[in-house]
Amino acid sequence: MSLDLQSLTSATHIVNPDVILIGSGVMSANLAAMLKCLEPRLSIQLYEVTDGLAQESSDGWNNAGTGHAGICELSYTPKRETDGSVNVGKAFEIFEQFEHSKQFWSYAVSTGMVDNPKEFINAIPHLSFLHGKEQIDFLRARHAAMSAHHFFDGMEYSTDRAAIASWAPLLLEGRGDVPIAATMMNGGTDVNFGAISRQLLHWLGQQESCGIASGHRVVGLRKTNAGWEVSAKHLATNEVRTNRAKFVFVGAGGGSLPLLQMSGIPEAKGLGGFPIGGQWLVCNNPEVVEKHQAKVYGQALDAAPTMAVPHLDTRMLDGKKRLLFGPFAAWTTKFLHKKGSVTDLPFSVRPDNLVTLLKIGIHNLDLVRYLIQQGTQSMADRLKVLHVFYPAAQGADWKLIDAGIRVQAIKKTDGQAGIVHYGTEVITDENRSISALLGASPGASVSVNIMLEVIKKCFPQLLANREGHTRMKAMIPTYDEDIKLTANAARFREVSRQAEEILQLRTR
């Protein structure tokens, strides 16, 4: 595709559309594309605060780019305290949900909605890497539980240094004689969520009765008898445009919480947000970059949020192979990386969430100390963490860059305040006229599944007739099947192979 989608800007406005979306990330892009395919007569307007599209959390430089499928992410497979076994249920769930993403993206490729799949998804081995007897025992048990299932039957386990070096040679360079173990599976992916978002939204902008307006900040979100009144200010001219819509979707990343609070819906009462900045070490030595061809995940550091699990990643960004390590967390009060303000966190504190936020501060002192430590560490400190994965790493080969900001959702569950570490929280009002997203990993990877649930809940009429059902079945072949892929190996292999061939993740 010759169009520069990274810098794509637009000011197309649809008067009083059926649907208004706020934010141009992967959630909004998938939802908008799915809705338009499901009901071509829908009118859709999208507002984005940045000048381009998908430049905040979905941008390739601002997230891990891992096609989260539970293959290598150890935080999804905790050890049971009762008997020491490994609970792999979450990994199975995430794997199946990521299959929905691959199915829809393959549909988008096959129908010409998006162009070359290599621009947004590429096959890459996924590795888990640990050392020390206790961690090696855990990894062995994890592999035994996962490889017995058809989702992960290609997963290999080894403590042999030569075998591990053949998977990821950097892990062994300069390493002393210590016990190590790794699992490897070739079925992993690297995903540029910004690229797929921009391609889907470029397609959307070409459809009838669909508009995209970047450089617009939503300054008003008010409930009316007929739906919602949304006011958006063009940041370049200060012109404010007001539209009405029956349904609003808030997919504004860290900016979703202030918009939810602006909406005044009862479901937003008591919600809070805890912003955590991110940083990467990026390798600038082409010889080192060329040696590594994998995503390697380790164990989470003590007190670290789930987004800060360290990993050494091969990435495809801006058409070039890259090598990133991290992420490192950073203290911030901004909710957005590019268009946020240092007043975002203080201004989000309200009487209804003050007690919740105070409880979080008191009961998560380890997290606060961790963020302070991360924000004050030196380059030498960061290299020490890198040396756990790549002992021979040289400081001159790496530079530190800022990444995106994640706002960890804070809510009350059973009367207690807690940070939403896993999954994505979908907040929907009683009338099902507005939905918004808050939460954490693996959100982008399973965004299609999350948006499918939004459609089921808020647009059930579009799926109730035969035509709508047939269209959704074309987009996501297994969306309505009672026998899940987890239990049906033959069906899984059938649909997975078809999607992966279209996405050029495997050859025929």
Image (cartoon, rainbow, N blue to C red):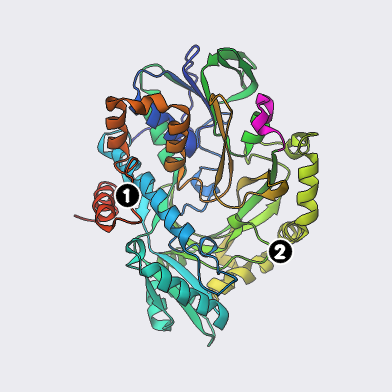
Can you identify the residue that label 1 sits on?
A: 483
- Quarter occupied by the C terminus: bottom left
In the rendered view, would you say 449 is above or below 205? below
Identify the magenta region: 261-270
Judging from the image, what secondary structure is the residue with disc 1 in?
A: loop
Q: Amino acid at mark 2?
A: Ser
In the rendered image, residue 490, in percent from the top left (x then y), is placed at 24, 56
Q: Residue at x 47, y 78 (%)?
A: 181
Principal secondary structure, stretch drawn in magenta = helix
Q: Which mark is residue 378?
A: 2
In the rendered image, residue 431, in percent from the top left (x then y), is placed at 55, 24
Distance from the alpha carbon under mark 1 to that under mark 2: 52 Å
- Quarter occupied by the N terminus: top left
Q: Amino acid at mark 1?
A: Ile
Judging from the image, what secondary structure is the residue with disc 2 in?
A: loop
User: 332 or 383, which is in the foreground?
Assistant: 332
